């Protein structure tokens, strides 16, 4: 097993993250992130963001091609009343039947609750409980229609999964800065849990925050607790920044040969 490192004190970490935030938390970097799609597409922002987040897995060009087909046919708002499946609209594990039923389910949610946020609030005013019950609601919809595993791949078991794509969507909706939309007003950003992608997991594992690189609820909670100790009012503030450090700057979150060419090497807590 690769040796883990230990981060410096809290103040040095916070200083590094704040400096990096000013560099990377800017719109010029959104093309490297799934938030590019709801930022770029017209229509109901919450609806477009929700669909975009659900399919934020795989190669970026394939995601983009699928979303173009989806929104061209099903529209950029949930009230188009599409009644027929389009067999040309499918994506990786999701068949055209899965996609059609997903659209039907989302449309029903909007008709019943007015918005995704409205559905969350109906289930609970506590964010984690609302998320859990919302995902279970979606899974029950699929079970009633005897849908296949492609549909359920979009809605993992909330009792064990880190629910990365849902948590990414919630960050977009609840936080507000140059990147995130801040459309939801009824939930607090302090209650957000980390959407743990490859770079966040690498950061946490290399620095002893988690003991493995599994996208689990347990690890999501551990990582969030670490960042709450740094910024209790806005623990996900550095999510976009850390993933850009990994993607754009090729940071491994530990001392290695890349550090020699890194613009952030001075006062870096990983070196």
Image: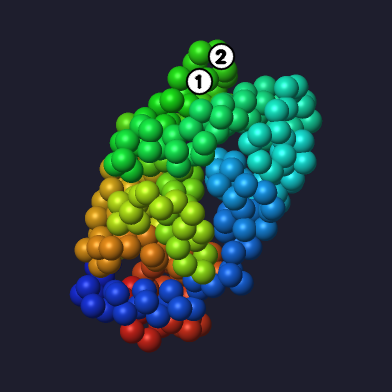
Q: Residues within 10 Å of mark 1 (few under 14, many from 20)?
A: some
**Residue 95 lies in what quarter of the image?**
top right
Rendered image: mark on residue 145: 2
Q: Is residue 228 visible?
A: yes
Q: Please provide percent x and percent y for residue 97.
A: 67, 22
Secondary structure at badge 1 equals helix
Q: Please provide percent x and percent y for residue 166.
A: 46, 43
Rendered image: mark on residue 132: none
Q: Residue furthest bottom?
A: 266
Tell me whether circle 1 and circle 2 mark residues in contact (CB < 8 Å).
Answer: yes
Secondary structure at badge 2 equals loop
Above-or-below relation of 67 to 231: above
Left or right: where 42 falls relative to 198: right
Q: Please provide percent x and percent y for residue 266.
A: 38, 86
User: Dot 1 corresponds to which residue?
Assistant: 141
Left or right: where 223 falls relative to 69: left
Residue drawn at x 52%, y 20% is 142
**Residue 239 lies in what quarter of the image?**
bottom left
Q: Nearer the viewer, residue 89 or 72?
A: 72
Q: Nearer the viewer, residue 227 or 246?
A: 227
Q: Is residue 212 visible?
A: no
Residue drawn at x 25%, y 63% is 232
Residue drawn at x 33%, y 84% is 267
Q: Quadrant of the C terminus?
A: bottom left
Disc 1 to disc 2, how far (Cα)? 6 Å
């Amino acid at each position: 097993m690769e040796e883990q490192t230990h981060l410096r004190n809290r103040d040095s970490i916070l200083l590094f993250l704040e400096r990096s935030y000013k560099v990377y938390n800017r719109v010029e970097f959104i093309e490297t992130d799934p938030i590019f799609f709801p930022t770029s597409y017209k229509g109901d922002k919450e609806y477009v963001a929700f669909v975009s987040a659900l399919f934020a897995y795989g190669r970026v060009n394939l995601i983009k091609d699928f979303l173009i087909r989806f929104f061209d046919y099903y529209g950029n708002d949930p009230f188009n009343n599409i009644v027929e499946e389009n067999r040309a609209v499918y994506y990786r594990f999701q068949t055209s039947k899965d996609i059609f039923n997903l659209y039907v389910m989302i449309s029903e949610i909007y008709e019943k609750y007015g918005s995704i946020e409205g559905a969350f609030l109906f289930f609970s005013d506590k964010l984690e409980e609302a998320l859990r019950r919302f995902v279970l609601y979606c899974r029950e919809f699929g079970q009633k229609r005897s849908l296949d595993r492609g549909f359920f791949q979009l809605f993992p078991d909330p009792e064990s999964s880190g629910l990365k794509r849902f948590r990414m969507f919630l960050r977009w909706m609840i936080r507000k800065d140059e990147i995130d939309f801040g459309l939801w007003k009824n939930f607090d950003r302090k209650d957000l849990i980390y959407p743990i992608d490859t770079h966040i997991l690498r950061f946490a594992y290399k620095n002893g925050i988690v003991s493995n690189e599994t996208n689990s609820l347990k690890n999501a909670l551990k990582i969030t607790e670490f960042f709450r100790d740094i910024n209790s009012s806005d623990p996900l503030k550095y999510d976009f920044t850390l993933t850009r450090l990994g993607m754009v700057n090729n940071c491994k979150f530990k001392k290695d040969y890349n550090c020699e060419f890194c613009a952030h090497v001075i006062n870096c807590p990983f070196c």
